[in-house]
Image (spheres, grey):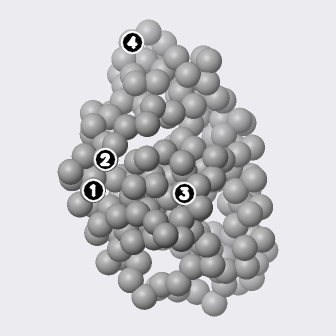
Amino acid sequence: MSSTFPEIYLVRHGETEWSASGKHTGRTDIPLTAAGEAAARSVAERLKGLSFQAVWSSPSQRAYNTCTLAGFGAAGVKKDDLQEWDYGAYEGLTTKQILAARPGWNVFRDGCPGGEMAADVGARADRIVSGLRAAGGNVLVFSSAHFLRVLAARWLGLPPQDGALLVLDTASLSTLGYEHDLTEPVIRRWNQK
């Protein structure tokens, strides 16, 4: 499962009430559901036998508790740049609700009033990518869907808006890495359950 080059393991947090209902959850700090906790524990089995140079987590309780329940809480370092997209006025709303008021809206293209645009999230992702490349080894990252999608796009050198092309389920595991050498970043695995 591993490569001779460093790999970046991305874990989306377990289910919350809002993720289950499709509500945009940026900075609202809500807990995992019982199902989300069970799924977070299952991440430990999928990462069994792997070692990490660093373990980073969003400061949100849904991400950090996923990190802890997966068995990495003692090593987990909270990084503000790993926070989910700031949805501003769209916090707590579903895409269907937003589209009713703003037909054709897409978070990756249009951003959120009072919140972040894709370029803002991309700038945070770029800082994380720089840190990941400087780490010199495997890194485990716990965060949220939209941010991790932008992070993967920026890892590949694509614009932040291209995160729209990737989907992540709760408690999924994805891996970023390299192909022939450190100048060829790739997605090695995506959205595995």
Q: Mark 2 packing: few (<14 Cα in 10 Å), some, or many (20+)?
A: many
Asked if the residues shown at circle 2 and circle 3 are in contact, with their CB atoms under 8 angstroms apart, the answer is no
Residue 89: which disc? Answer: none
Estimate the spatial distance between the alpha carbons at disc 2 and disc 3, rounded to whole Å.
15 Å
Question: Relative to the observer, which residue lies in front, 59 or 85?
Answer: 59
Report the residue marked by disc 3: 57
Tell me the kind of residue under disc 3: Ser
Q: Which residue corresponds to mark 2? A: 32
Chain-order first, disc 4 or disc 3: 3
Label 4 vs label 1, nearer the camera: 1
The residue beneath circle 1 is: 37
Q: Is residue 109 left or right of residue 63?
A: right
| Crowd band around label 4 with a 10 angstrom C-alpha radius: few (<14), some (14–19), many (20+) | few
Extreme-top residue of the structure = 101
Q: Earlier in the sequence, mark 4 or mark 1?
A: 1
Residue 117 position (above or below residue 55) = above
Is the residue under label 2 in contact with that under label 4 (CB below 8 Å)? no
